[in-house]
Image (cartoon, rainbow, N blue to C red):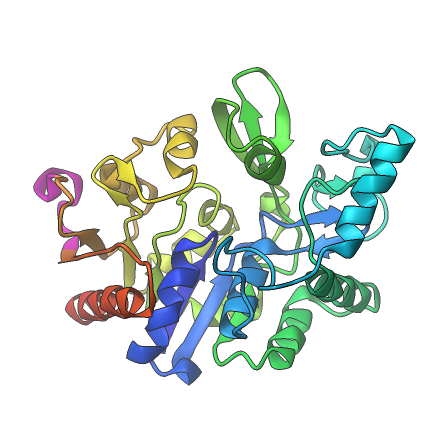
Amino acid sequence: MVTFLAGGTGTPKLLDGATRVFPAADVSVVANTGDDIELGGHLVCPDVDTVLFAGGGVLDRETWWGIADDTTATHEELGRLADAAGLDRGPRYLDDAAQISGREIARWRRFSGVAEFMEIGDRDRAVHLTRTGLLDEGHTLTEITRTLADAFDLDVDLLPMSDDPVATLVHTAGGETIHFQEYWVDRRGSPTVDDVEFRGSRDAEPTAEVREALADPVVIGPSNPVTSIGPMLALPGFEAALAETPVVAVSPFVGGEVFSGPAAELMAGVGLDPSTAGVADAYPFADAVVLDDDDPTDTDRALAGVHVEYTDTRIDDDDDAERVARACDRALGAVS
């Protein structure tokens, strides 16, 4: 049995090859939900859905978002209506009262559906409608995710990190507080990051299913340590559980260079060195780290007492993912 912590695209890419190394029936995936938003009343769970769509064979692998070859007629019509009515297309947060009313939510993740600042495909939208409808019927996010996983014939056990809402908020150097989706999707990571907050995390709990999964050896793929893995670590008891089980982390950096995404800017914003050494600081519970063959990090200083496994960590296809997964397996064998 092995559990992967997934957020962004790093760990989902690794999962493409992981089931060649680990039997799918023995794999659990705990997905970040700090990126979730309510858009036009529909709950969108980007990191859950990336794993869901990838495992179901329908993910758009050009964007690593949404369903391949999906149509966007509804999204386009929303934009046309906004333009015709003279309405702003930018992210439109609902007011403070709306952020804390209705179903339980973490404040600052609720947006108007006017003009949709995130592109939602038509088939993708059906997933969000189904999820939200089942949530309104009283089902938990864990139950709903398993229902959707059955619909997509997922082989691994996909679990949201919590049934309680958490919102990842970026505090900018200009004094704004914006949701991570606005920071990354609408503003393309342009504001300078001053801090990152996981609002609601103190009142949230890992589910019983997640706690059970964390009792198995854990692999943290090459995901963003701040916004992909950070919301999980902010949950009460999550990091303590990792300290009690073998943990292997794949660095998303090669020294000070990141393969993709805003990991460097976000790590610098929260006071971590944007490098493999900073990843080690973010994961003090890690027993082993998988590094790229070209990573120049001084492991005697930055990773003292941690087992280090080297391989080519770039993942462009399933064979690459299998190579990295085998390095994770070797590392688990060394520390288990």
Identified at 59% across, 39% down, the residue is: 185
Lateral position of residue 31 relative to residue 94, left or right? left
- Residue 232 point in image, percent of width and height: 49, 52
- In which quadrant of the rendered view does residue 209 lie? bottom right
Q: Quadrant of residue 49?
A: bottom right
Q: Residue furthest top?
A: 174
Foreground: 187 or 135? 187
Residue 201 painted magenta: no
Q: How many marks?
A: 0
Determine whether, in the image, residue 197 is placed left or right of residue 39. Answer: left
Residue 69, given in percent of the width and then of the height, sits at 61, 64
Residue in the image at 65% along x and 79% along y: 151
Q: Is residue 305 magenta?
A: yes
Q: Which residues are magenta?
A: 298-307
Task: Give the percent coordinates (x, y) of residue 92.
Answer: 77, 33
- Does the rendering let one see residue 299? yes
Residue 18, picture quadrant: bottom left
Residue at 55% in and 37% down: 184
- Residue 113 seen: no
Q: Nearer the viewer, residue 150 or 196?
A: 150
Where's residue 159, x and y in %?
55, 68
